Image (cartoon, helix red, strand yellow):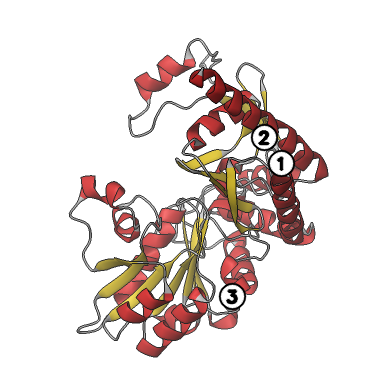
Amino acid sequence: MTETTRTFTAEDWHEKYGQVMMGSLAVPAVMLEHGSGAYVWDVDGKEYLDFLAGIAVNSLGHAHPVLVDAIATQAAKLVHVSNYFATPSQVALAERLLRISGAGDGGRVFFGNSGAEANEAAFKLARLNSRPGRTRILALNNGFHGRTMGSLALTGKPHMREPFEPMPPGVEHIESTIAALEAAIDDDVAALFVEPIKGEAGVIDLPEGFLAAARELTARHGALLVVDEIQTGVGRTGAWFAVQHAGIVPDAITVAKGMAGGVPIGALITFGAASELFERGQHGSTFGGNPLATAAADAVLEEIESAGLIENARIRGRQLRELLRGIRSPLIAELRGAGLLIGIGLTEPVANELTAAALRRGLIINATNDSSIRLAPPLIIGDDEIAEFGRRFSAALDDLRNDTRGADQ
């Protein structure tokens, strides 16, 4: 009989991970085995409250019956057919995305397998908006758009780009200010890429009026406004897409992460004239838009809509912020973000230590840098999960304070 599963324990999996996995990532702290709702369990049976949700991916939490049923039902029909053929779930999902994004009948959708691939497609879209002299593409300092070569060129983090230079040419990074926009955008710019909230930078909000100014300036100069909604989209901020809070219509948005609740998928959604830029044969993906992923995504989006989870993101986001303010920890300097994408700015560079303390208390959160914590729980959380988060997070703060006091003695 062929062995199809392997049982791991805390004693052996760390070593095995280092032997078989590429060294591009550190060895994880725990090995997770199963989950339910907002909770996961490791291979030794320890329970964790998951307030990261796979980095804003597991919109419906873990093992949600709607997603489980959609995957099983579709797998029994078709998993993959290539892009030589269409499937009902592919067209249905595209129609849904055009509706919820506001792109409407003039919009179009391209499916890939990840956020980075969606941004690669958007990069090529920007190139198609070029003309003699229009070769510049703008992106924001400290922004993040992916790790493939094109999306990495857009990423405003020099330490990530430098080992892989030279990057694809033509990308310039500017400060996230309206003044910088006004100084940089002219008729030579083909596109501007922005995150409505900089997730990987620590859940950093853009200045008030930034997106409106970006829309006005790009439209005036014929440049595309491409909004990266990989992390902020699919209801996470209390709207289908964070750009909708600003009341503007972009030329394109990219989406992935929470769209299929954990099944890999990404999409580029175009609006208006931008939908006419790609011509046949100029882009493609073997796996992109396959029936399994699109059926899963359509089911997740339907559940988000029918279960009122966008409103839940608004309500629970407010609750979490009130809870965090009520803790009154001297370590908490500020709260950032929107809905259920929350950044906690710390007064000391101890985010990694706090994340480790939380994990020991059975709480999964994320340190995006030395002084920022990111929360991105499933959209399904309610009163019980928020109360439990408060208990575990407060305990982690106390543990960290006690550890610090002990080290000073």
Residue type at numbered disc 1: Ile
Q: In 3D space, how far apart are the residues under numbered discs 1 and 2 (Cα atoms)? A: 9 Å
Which of 277 and 401 lies nearest the eye of the viewer?
401
Q: Vertical placement of 99 versus 257: above or below?
A: below
Crowding around mark 3 (Cα neighbors within 10 Å: few <14, some 14 to 19, many 20+) is: some
Residue type at numbered disc 2: Phe
Q: Which mark is residue 246?
A: 3
The answer to which of marks 2 and 3 sits earlier in the sequence is: 3
Marks 1,2: beta carbons within 8 A: yes
Residue under circle 1? Answer: 327
Residue under circle 2? Answer: 393
Marks 1,3: beta carbons within 8 A: no
State left or right for residue 304 relative to residue 219.
right
- Where is residue 397 shown, x and y percent of the image? 63, 32
* Residue at (59, 52) in percent of width and height: 334
Marks 2,3: beta carbons within 8 A: no
Between circles 1 and 2, the one closer to the viewer is 1
Residue type at numbered disc 3: Ala
State left or right for residue 271 relative to residue 133.
right
* Residue at (46, 55) in percent of width and height: 115
* Residue at (25, 81) in percent of width and height: 134
Please tell me in which quadrant of the rendered image residue 236 appears: bottom right
Q: In 3D space, how far apart are the residues under numbered discs 1 and 3 (Cα atoms)? A: 31 Å
- Where is residue 377 shown, x and y percent of the image? 65, 45
